[in-house]
Amino acid sequence: MATARFWRDNPSRYNLKAVRCGNCGKVFFPPRAVCSVCHRKSIGKMECMSLKGEGELISFSVVHDAPSQFEIHKPYVVAIVRMDEGVMLTSQLIDVDPKEVRIGMRVRTTLRKVGEDGPAGVIYYGYKFAPVRA
Amino acid sequence: MRDVAIIGIGSTKFGELWDMSFRDLGMQAGLSAVADAKLAAEDIDALYVGNMSAGRFIEQEHVAALIADYSGLARDHVPATRIEAAGASGGLAFREGYLAVASGMHDIVVVGGAEKMTDVADVMATEIQSSAADQQWEVVFGATLASLFAMIARRHMHEFGTTREQIAQVAVKNHRHGALNPIAQYQKEIDLATVLRAPPVAEPLGVFDCAPLSDGAAAVVLCAMDRARSYTSKPVRIAASAQASDTLALHSRTQITTFNATKVAAEKAFRQADRTPEQVQLAEVHDNFTIAEILAIEDLGLFPKGQGGRATMDGETALGGKVAVNTSGGLKARGFPFGATGVAQLVELVQQLRGEAGKRQVPDASLALAQNAGGTGATVVVSLLEVA
Ligand SMILES: [Zn+2]
């Protein structure tokens, strides 16, 4: 992946930058310029915010057939998480035995390496999820 | 808007066709459809080609003109247009051709779909397939299209009590149908244990839950209904063709076990045709993964939400059941050349409505539905065909 294409999105990847519609309150991640509920009424009213980073597991899969870039990580767990602010995100779930993963479990984001541009290339960082332990 | 008929169909065999190039595939399907309609080249007003990713599979863009050229249409300077919407490219090309004839702009249009996928390594083909999902917010984190459908499957099991066996039965049923289809990539039956014991791809889905990598092309000829009978004694009427979109990323929706684009496109199609889901006798749906067929038959209104798995296990979607789903073998057994798929669905339905489907024939078939989806349902086309 070309470097600029990745770092352009760094505020959301590093700090979970999102937006909230000032008209209806719906949260969008990554940020959008227009709310899909309010359309034109939302223009200029999308307010910056950061997701707190905690949420609930909606679903998950253990990936065995991986793209070349993720070959060394397999098998790994991908998950869809509903953040406490209401939006859903897709990323990997780490620091957990795949057999212990359950729908509904509480998870939290953590900044990790998510990929690199070839063996000697640029390393990309972003969020992954890990279980919230009591 | 005027009535439009399908007056010709053609298809290559589907599978790993190493001796055929992309242009060979498109040409062969197109010429057989034109021959079936008994058309002369000068009758053709326009060509539409559904293709997802020739640029990455064979490093060739500009493929509509290429197919027109190798089909012998260069000196006729026929307008040729490529349509792309991932796995829905073929269904969408069909809808564009339909609109062109229905509007009165064109009288006769050829719609083709083609994809040449086996010139690249399997891992590359899988990466190209995943580009139908959101590269920046799904794929970059390690999600593959298979893993997104695996998450849909697991959530469907969680919400509705759908079982792993019910999901696997989609593959068993579609292989049974494919065994009756001479153009299918897989013409061999498989049993439930084979699906369940297959190596995992993205849990809970295994190798036999995923449609294969395939080469292939299909084509249909569309004609204004008032001229159709001068070409064929069995025109098939396009009762409706509707399209809907949704968020590109699966996670951007409020839930992941319904494809709202399928629901919306189906509602529009049934309204346009003045028909109801109960009247549909057979359907070709987009089973790129087994779970996708269960979602489709629910979201189309053929079965209540959450009942798709049970209906499949009870044989209600098999030949002879309440509504025969994927009599061609579906994407799973007929094969899944991305851009060709939506058009191949229509070729199967026309064969059925003409009463020419051989051992796969649904008795007295008169109303049929096609549902073609891109990615995780960000584009869906639903079309209804009926005996004219
Ligand atoms: Zn709003």
Image (cartoon, coloured by chain):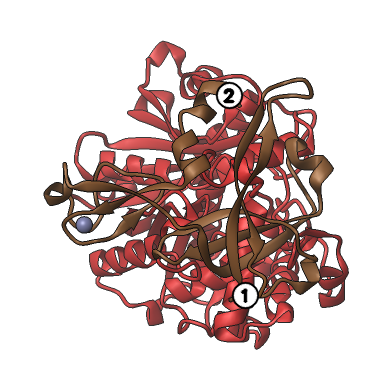
Chain colours: A brown, B red
- On whether disc 2 and disc 1 are found on a single subunit, the reply is no
Seen in the picture, residue B258 relative to B74 is either above or below; the reply is below
Tell me which residue sits at (49%, 19%) in the image: B62
Image spot of residue B126 (x, y percent): 70, 42
Res B289 seen here = no
User: Which quadrant of the figure has residue B319?
Assistant: bottom right
Task: Classify mark 1: helix, strand or loop.
Answer: loop
> Label 2 is placed on what type of residue?
Gly
Which mark identifies residue A103?
1
- Residue nearest the viewer, comparing B250 with B51: B250
Other-residue count near label 2 (Cα within 10 Å), few / some / many at <14 / 14–19 / ≥20:
few
Tell me which residue sits at (65%, 88%) in the image: B314
Q: How far apart are marks 2 and 1 (CA)?
A: 39 Å
Figure quadrant, ligand 1: bottom left
B184 horizontally vs B365: left or right: right
Seen in the picture, residue B202 relative to B118 is either above or below; the reply is below
Which mark identifies residue B47?
none
Which mark identifies residue B55?
2
Tell me which residue sits at (33%, 77%) in the image: B276
Image spot of residue B388 (x, y percent): 34, 62
Cβ–Cβ below 8 Å for labels 2 and 1? no
Image spot of residue A98 (x, y percent): 78, 66
Q: Does the residue labelled 1 lie within 8 Å of ligand 1?
A: no
